[in-house]
Structure formats: C-alpha cells, structure tokens
Amino acid sequence: MFSELSYAIAKNQIGLKEITLKKGEILQRSGELNTKVYHVKSGLLRSYSIDKNGKENIFMFAPEGWIIADTCKPESEAVLFIDALENSTVRILPKDLEREKQNISAITKRLNALQNRILMLTSTNAIERYEQFIMEYPNIAQRVPQRMIASYLGVTPETLSAAKNKHYKKR
C-alpha cells in the first residue's frame, strides 16, 4: 500500500509512523483495506471519490492539525481516496476506536466540518457555500485549485467564479 510513499521517520510507543508525502502522492486508494487514521502534521490532504464517469468528488480537506480517514470499519474496504495536495508530513495510526475516543477534540472538529458541509450542500446557494467554505477552511482557498473548491462545494468552476465575484462585491 505505501510503496510509492517517501518514508521518513520511525515508530513510537503506540505504533505511530510519521511519513513525508510529496504533492500528488496517494496515501489511500478506494478498495484497499481501511485500517489507518491519518493526522496531518504539516501540509494539506484531501479525501475524494471517483464516480462511474471518472469525475472526482471531494469529500473533505485536511490541513495541519486535522485528522482524515475513511469512516468505514477497519476490516472494510476504503471507499475514499486520500492524497497530498502539498508536500506533507502525516502521522499514521492504526484504526483503534478506543484510542480515537481519547482524541475527542480532533474527532469533534472533523464531525463538525462534515455536519456543516451536509447542511451547506442541502440548504444554501453557491455564494453561501463559498462563504461557509472560507469560514471552515480560512487558509485553504489560496492553497488549492479552484476546480477542487468547486468540487467540494458541489458546483461547477464557472458557478464558483460567479459566486466569488458576488462575495467580494458584497465586501
């Protein structure tokens, strides 16, 4: 699974591995056994699916300090791809639900972001979605291509461009 990764640092007392990823490297592929949780020490990751037409659908971004993982059970196949959008340092932990309960602040942050995203996608227009994105991810807009933000927001790049223009005219 990790043959293409640039391995760096050794294990610590709980089996934590720290690796360095280059921009574009894939950390997890859909269909692989889903046994890992990733904590972003530096850089930026994203999780996404690819639909039957080959279109990427971004599920979430994970900047520094965030946790990213597929939420299915450890013995299940992963549904999502996870890759590096920037050169990144990531801590890899085995999926251990008991240990994860102890890291409640990171889990709460992730769940809050996902809840906000679901509400955003079901009840807001493109301008409101963009404004919510800026609030949720204040330092990411300049770090990722606009097409990825559009994918995350569930709009076309053209709709995103128009929403951004309206957002900045309001200010």
Image: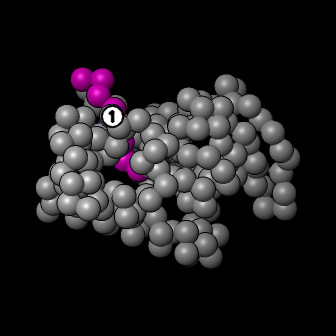
Coordinates of residue 145 in the picture (x, y in percent)? 41, 35
Residue at image point 32% right, 66% down: 115
Residue labelled with disc 1: 147
Prevailing secondary structure class for the magenta stretch in the rendered image: strand
Start-end of magenta stretch? 53-60
Dividing the picture into quarters, in which one does residue 113 lie?
Answer: bottom left
- Side of 13 where 137 appears, left or right: left
- Can you see residue 128? no
Coordinates of residue 51 in the picture (x, y in percent)? 28, 31
Dividing the picture into quarters, in which one does residue 97 lie?
Answer: bottom right
Q: Residues within 10 Å of mark 1 (few under 14, many from 20)?
A: some
Residue at image point 56% right, 59% down: 66
- Side of 26 where 51 appears, left or right: left
Q: Is mark 1 on a helix, strand or loop?
A: helix
Residue at image point 35% right, 37% down: 146
In the rendered structure, does residue 56 fall within the stretch colored magenta? yes
In the rendered structure, does residue 39 fall within the stretch colored magenta? no
If the image is split into quadrants, where does the C terminus sit?
A: bottom left
Coordinates of residue 118 in the picture (x, y in percent)? 26, 60
If the image is split into quadrants, where does the N terminus sit?
A: top right
88 or 99, which is in the foreground? 88
- Can you see residue 114? yes
Residue at image point 23% right, 42% down: 160
- Side of 171 where 143 appears, left or right: right
Coordinates of residue 78 in the picture (x, y in percent)? 46, 42
73 or 88, which is in the foreground? 88
- Side of 131 where 97 appears, left or right: right
Q: What residue type is labelled 1?
A: Arg
Q: Is residue 16 above or below residue 52?
A: below
